[in-house]
Image: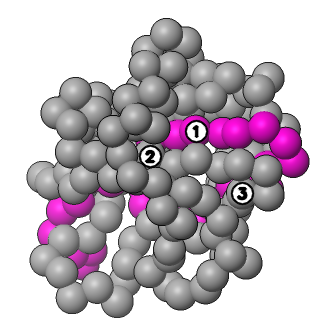
Amino acid sequence: MRTNWQLTAGILSAEVCHELVDFCKNKLTLDDASVFSGGGPEARQTKVGWTTDPKVLTLIENYALKANREAFNFKVDFLPPVQFAEYGTGGHYDWHHDVHWESAGRYDRKLSVVIQLSDPTQYQGGEFQFREVETPLAFKQQGSILVFPSYLLHRVTPIENGTRHSLVGWMEGPHWA
């Protein structure tokens, strides 16, 4: 049976999640996010920063490669900088996929990895959802890591109050055939 996603619920401790948030907020410059398909605040309202910290890259890569071995078997061999995202009140990201089909680059995003860093009791809204496949409800648990094919449509619903933090990385490989 094919798998739509791989979830490791609550694998990172609250302490590790807090350390990652503190590291990103103190070391990265957060700017308004953009989307490669265009659109402004109506499509996405998020602050993001980028990191190449070896610990963060290794964390993302290890879970991506494990999920790839167990479920997807995609040809992936490159991990670009990882995105730290901060969704404040009103923050959201409308339906999108992570593959930039118009890119002239050598690689396509093939696996998306999202790490839920926030305690879900500290914000309302901000639900991660898939459009065409079931959404793993346990992903909202702090410290959860979700890996899925980058072509799946997904979104983050508007934050009603509080703040949601996440790390997002993409394993890339040769263009989709």
> Where is 159 relative to 20, above or below?
below
Badge 2 density bin: few <14, some 14–19, many ≥20, Cα 10 Å: many
Secondary structure at badge 1 equals: strand
* Predominant SS along the magenta part: strand
Secondary structure at badge 2 equals: strand
Is disc 2 in contact with disc 1, using a CB cutoff of under 8 Å?
Answer: yes
Q: Which residue is mark 3?
A: 91
167, 7: nearer the viewer: 167
Quadrant housing residue 170: bottom left
Residue 74's mark?
none
Q: Earlier in the sequence, mark 2 or mark 1?
A: 2
Query: How far apart are the two marked residues, 3 and 2, measured between alpha carbons?
Result: 14 Å
Q: Earlier in the sequence, mark 3 or mark 1?
A: 3
Name the amino acid type tagged 3.
Answer: Gly
Which residue does the image show at 18% across and 81% down from the upper left? Answer: 105
- The reply to whether residue 1 is visible in this rendering is no
Which residue does the image show at 37% across and 83% down from the upper left? Answer: 101
Secondary structure at badge 3 equals: loop
Position of residue 173 measured from the top left corner of the image (x, y, whole percent): 18, 62
Badge 3 density bin: few <14, some 14–19, many ≥20, Cα 10 Å: many
Position of residue 104 measured from the top left corner of the image (x, y, whole percent): 21, 88
Which residue does the image show at 58% across and 47% down from the upper left? Answer: 86
Q: Which residue is mark 2?
A: 84
Q: Horizontal placement of 106 versus 121: left or right? A: left
- The reply to whether residue 130 is visible in this rendering is yes
Residue 165's mark?
1
> Where is 136 relative to 138, above or below?
below
Q: Which residues are magenta?
A: 148-177
